[in-house]
Image (cartoon, rainbow, N blue to C red):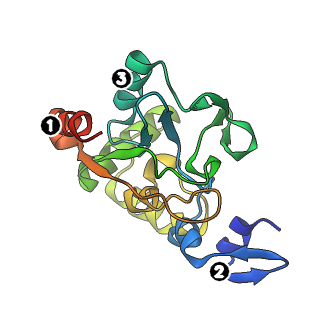
Amino acid sequence: MHWITLCALGVFGDREGIVVPEDACMRTRVHCVGHRAQEVVIIPEVKIAYIEIRKAASENVRGILRDVFARSFDTCGDDPVGQCGYERFWGHRCTTACFDSLDDYFVFTMLRDPVTRFYSSLHEVTKQKHLPVPSKQQLLNQLRTWYSRPVDHHFESQVMSLASPLRGGDMVTIDYLGRVENYTQSWEDVMRLA
């Protein structure tokens, strides 16, 4: 049995020979998720790592990192993703769980106002799944069911995304939290601080 399954069952500690650190289970205690660590773009040339948070300018940030540094989460720096990555129907993605440490990197991410992020996620999901925008009552009914089954990855909490484990179970230390609402200033800060 994999430790994420044990986490989902609320089992912590040593079970069936698998050590399950309680902090590493934060991602599964909040709600069911389809992956155990957050995607990361690694840029070894300048020692920068970007932790993805969906619906917080992530596509834009990844585009800049791809255009400027020719890097994406399709590789782990110079290495192929391998089994440590997050597998979706479009392939493996590099995650923080692919690394023992990111201490040598300047690790950053972008956060977004939770209310505008929620509505952006709702728009994205209804568009992708060709669904009509739900009424307020339909939305409330849907929200009530999300804690008993996997949630669409666009609705994952930003806090959960920040609590992304490394290979050994320690959490990634994030050096800078940018704000989508101050996007230009956040990028200037990242370039100055990195």
Task: Determine the image quadrant of residue 133.
Answer: top left
Q: Earlier in the sequence, mark 1 or mark 2?
A: 2
Residue 185's mark? 1
Q: Nearer the viewer, residue 123 or 87?
A: 87
Of residues 191 and 96, the one drawn nearer to the viewer in this rendering:
191
Residue occupying image coordinates x 34% and y 28%? 60
| Residue 108 position within the rendered picture, expressed as x and y whole percent measured from the top left | 35, 45
Quadrant of the frame with the N terminus: bottom right
Q: Residues within 10 Å of mark 2 (few under 14, many from 20)?
A: few
Q: Is residue 151 left or right of residue 13?
A: left
- In the image, taking residue 168 as reference, residue 122 lies left or right, namely left
Residue at x 52% of width, y 49% of height: 38
Spatial CA distance of label 3 from label 1 is 15 Å
**In the picture, which quadrant includes the C terminus?**
top left
Mark 1 crowdedness (10 Å alpha carbons): few <14, some 14-19, many ≥20: few
Kindly state the secondary structure of the residue where label 1 is placed: helix
Q: Which mark is residue 64?
A: 3
Total numbered labels placed on residues in the image? 3
**Residue denoted by label 2:** 10
What is the crowding at mark 3: few (fewer than 14 residues within 10 Å), some, or many (at least 20)? Answer: some
Looking at the image, is mark 1 or mark 2 nearer the viewer? 1
